[in-house]
Image (cartoon, grey):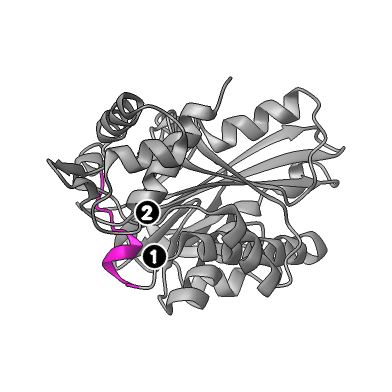
Amino acid sequence: MNNAPQGNKLAILHALNQRGFISGQLLATQLGISRAAISKHIKSLQEMGIDIFSLNGKGYCLNESLPLLNPQNIVASLQRLSCQNSVEVQPIIDSTNSELMRRIQQGEALDSGQVLVAEMQQAGRGRRGRVWQSPFGANLYYSYYWRLDDGLQAAMGVSIAVGLAVYDAIEALYGLSVELKWPNDIYLNGRKLAGVLVELEGQVEGPCHLVIGIGINLQMPENASKGIDQPWTDLASHTHSLDKNVLVAQLTHSLAQRLSLYEKSGLTAMVEQWNKVNAFANEMVTLSTGMRTWRGICEGIDPQGGIVLRQDGELKSYYGGEISLRKDEA
């Protein structure tokens, strides 16, 4: 596929992101394309939900600046953290997780710790087949490849480590203390800020490949939020120092540290940490698989990463990535 049109869209956005008006003719000259092509790209970007307005005699202007990805800035931020991971940036993709899974299934050699980020996903996915709202430039769409040599069973608690890595990154950059909802969500002030989707490919006892997808709401436009079926928030509502490139680097660094610890000692050092930031601690909750439901008081996680409910005075653990956990509003 020819990525030149997508590259041009990204170049136009970077030019508009400098604030103020820029003429269509100047954009055309800078990119070496026609004025009509600029107009077509602008219209396409507007259809993606980006608020660009035009004024005769002045040109185009972004209504709000966007936290855009810049590969050079990501590399510089990684170097400051002494982080060696490789990060690939794509303008538009179906899904960062899907792309890495395709490469694995096609036998492509990936380095453990390789990261893929995109400005927009056209088929972003959450858990249980849900759509993940992925407007252009507004949020972080991120996937991390990790090879685990101890088999699929050893990967059972990975989402716990990943949630804590997101906690680490957001606390380090913004001083915000998020809460974690089992098994895959990150909350801030009782509203969903981010989600995790871990996908696996491999053998029960042999090497396995993990693709760790993370979506973080950064600057969610109102028109895109209409498709979200639960209370949500974004980082721009809580901080003014939002640099997506620094966030990519810090998240990568935090993941590398947490996954290294997980590989050495599993969840031993993380259970107590996770339970301190459990979003539903001591709340009445409902677990559901779609076929069955259970109710109980949420007591946190056990040493294997399962959710523990207190039911009729007894503690019971539940496991599985396809279980939904909700606070009981009854």
Question: In the picture provided, is 282 more to the left or to the right than 257?
Answer: left
Earlier-in-chain disc, 2 versus 1 = 2
The quadrant of the picture occupied by the N terminus is top right
Tell me the magenta residue range: 230-240
Query: In the image, residue 229 lies at what x, y percent?
Result: 25, 41
126 or 220, which lies in front? 220
Label drawn at residue 251? none
Which residue in the protein does label 1 denote? 279
Kind of residue at disc 1: Ala
Question: In the picture provided, is 103 more to the left or to the right than 251?
Answer: right
Instruction: Say what secondary structure mark 2 lies in.
Output: loop
Above-or-below relation of 150 to 67:
above
Answer whether residue 326 is visible to the viewer in this image.
no
Above-or-below relation of 48 to 188:
above
Query: In the image, residue 213 lies at what x, y percent?
Result: 56, 45
Asked which quadrant contains residue 168, the reply is bottom right
